[in-house]
Image: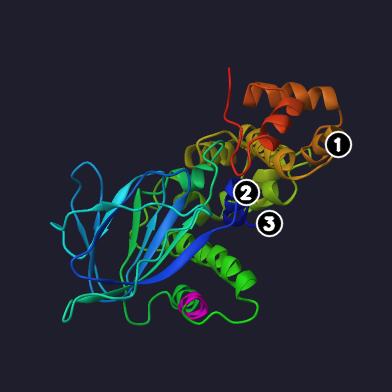
């Protein structure tokens, strides 16, 4: 199984939204903090990303892509000194598209923007380690798959056709994965420590794929180390250093994270959730789940069902 795909799957809580908009100078929008993530693609013209707390503005050129990875507010404007107005979400969670008109001679900017609904409860560290803003400048011949996804999404939004309602969310999910993959493989990602290094390390990445592929299996540290040709001790040290948890502690955390997703999204008996999480005893599963989440599995499920589009936060 794919660690990156799994990390996104456990955090996704609703349909993503996107828009293709034209703005005429002067323009500036302030996007409030949110629980999800978002992106901006500059298709034409120029723009500036304005981080909060007086962070240095980032100039965007045609073809540049920015992923706003965390629940952080930010601004986007034609110039760094343009006053910002609050961007207000529509009832469905999308950003309303402004009228396609402007003063004669005004500089025109074409943007492709999107937002993802993600749960921050039990977020995978692969995503929490990302910088607040991932800026991928356009370069000739660089990131061809990411560019292809952007082009396809832009075309569907510019000229919707039969099937677009299904195609656009799928393309948005694809675009997010390409954004993250491109960052993790970029020269600017620090591969000396953390998850970028873990995914690049043959022994650790092999173990992670195995754990995600079969989390219910009673893995041993020796078995996981053998997948990468390492001794138990050497593997345990390397895994703990890069991932931040010992191998079996990570396995337990991932089992509980997967169980939380099943309880939120599937109508499975608790016994089945326990078995998929690697527990033959429903009692042992409930005890481990409560230790991790602070509530019993049944109560967690009721709370998740009672809050549409969100997740139950840790209590206790």
Residue 246 on the magenta segment: no
Report x, y in % for residue 315.
58, 21
SS at badge 1: loop
Tell how many labels: 3
In the depicted view, which residue is nearer to us: 10 or 26? 26
Q: Which mark is residue 269?
A: 1
Which quarter of the image is occupied by the N terminus? bottom right
Q: Residues within 10 Å of mark 1 (few under 14, many from 20)?
A: few
> Could you say which is closer to the camera, residue 106 or residue 4?
106
Say which of marks 3 and 2 sits in front. 3
Q: Quadrant of residue 271?
A: top right
Q: Judge left or right: residue 14 versus residue 71.
A: right
Residue marked by disc 3: 1
Q: CA distance from mark 2 to mark 1?
A: 28 Å
State how far apart marks 3 and 2 are (Cα): 9 Å
**For the residue carrying disc 3, how many other residues have a C-alpha within 10 Å: few (<14), some (14-19), or many (20+)?**
few
17 horizontally vs 131: left or right: right
Please report the bounds of the magenta region as a residue range.
151-157
Q: Report the side of 184 relative to 102 (left or right).
A: right
Of circles 2 and 1, the one toward us is 1
- Residue at 60% x, 67% y is 170
Residue 11 x %, y %: 58, 46
Residue marked by disc 2: 208
Helix, strand or loop at mark 2: helix
3 or 2: tag closer to the N-terminus: 3
Asked if residue 228 can be seen in this view, the reply is no
- Residue 86 in sight in this render: yes
> Is label 3 in a helix, a strand or a loop?
loop
């Amino acid at each position: 199984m794919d660690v990156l795909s799994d990390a996104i799957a456990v955090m996704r809580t609703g349909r993503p939204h996107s828009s293709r908009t034209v703005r005429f100078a002067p323009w500036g929008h302030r996007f409030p903090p949110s629980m999800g993530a978002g992106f901006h693609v500059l298709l034409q013209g120029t723009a500036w990303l304005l981080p909060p707390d007086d962070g240095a503005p980032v100039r965007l050129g045609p073809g540049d892509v920015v992923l706003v990875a965390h629940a952080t507010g930010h601004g986007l404007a034609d110039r760094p000194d343009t006053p910002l107005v609050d961007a207000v979400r529509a009832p469905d969670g999308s950003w309303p598209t402004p009228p396609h008109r402007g003063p004669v001679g005004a500089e025109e900017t074409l943007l492709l923007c999107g937002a993802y609904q993600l749960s921050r409860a039990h977020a995978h560290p692969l995503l929490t380690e990302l910088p607040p803003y991932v800026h991928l400048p356009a370069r000739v011949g660089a990131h061809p798959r990411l560019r292809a996804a952007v082009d396809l999404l832009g075309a569907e939004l510019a000229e919707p056709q039969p099937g677009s309602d299904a195609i656009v969310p799928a393309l948005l999910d694809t675009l997010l994965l390409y954004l993250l993959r491109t960052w993790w493989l970029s020269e600017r990602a620090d591969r000396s420590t953390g998850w970028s290094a873990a995914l690049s390390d043959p022994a650790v990445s092999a173990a992670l794929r195995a754990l995600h592929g079969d989390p219910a299996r009673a893995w041993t540290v020796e078995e996981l180390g053998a997948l990468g040709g390492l001794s138990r001790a050497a593997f345990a040290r390397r895994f703990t250093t890069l991932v931040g948890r010992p191998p079996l502690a990570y396995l337990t955390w991932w089992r509980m994270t997967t169980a939380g997703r099943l309880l939120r999204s599937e109508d499975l008996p608790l016994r089945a959730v326990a078995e998929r999480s690697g527990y033959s005893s429903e009692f042992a599963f409930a005890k481990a789940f409560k230790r991790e989440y602070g509530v019993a599995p049944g109560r967690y499920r009721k709370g998740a069902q009672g809050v549409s589009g969100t997740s139950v936060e840790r209590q206790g």
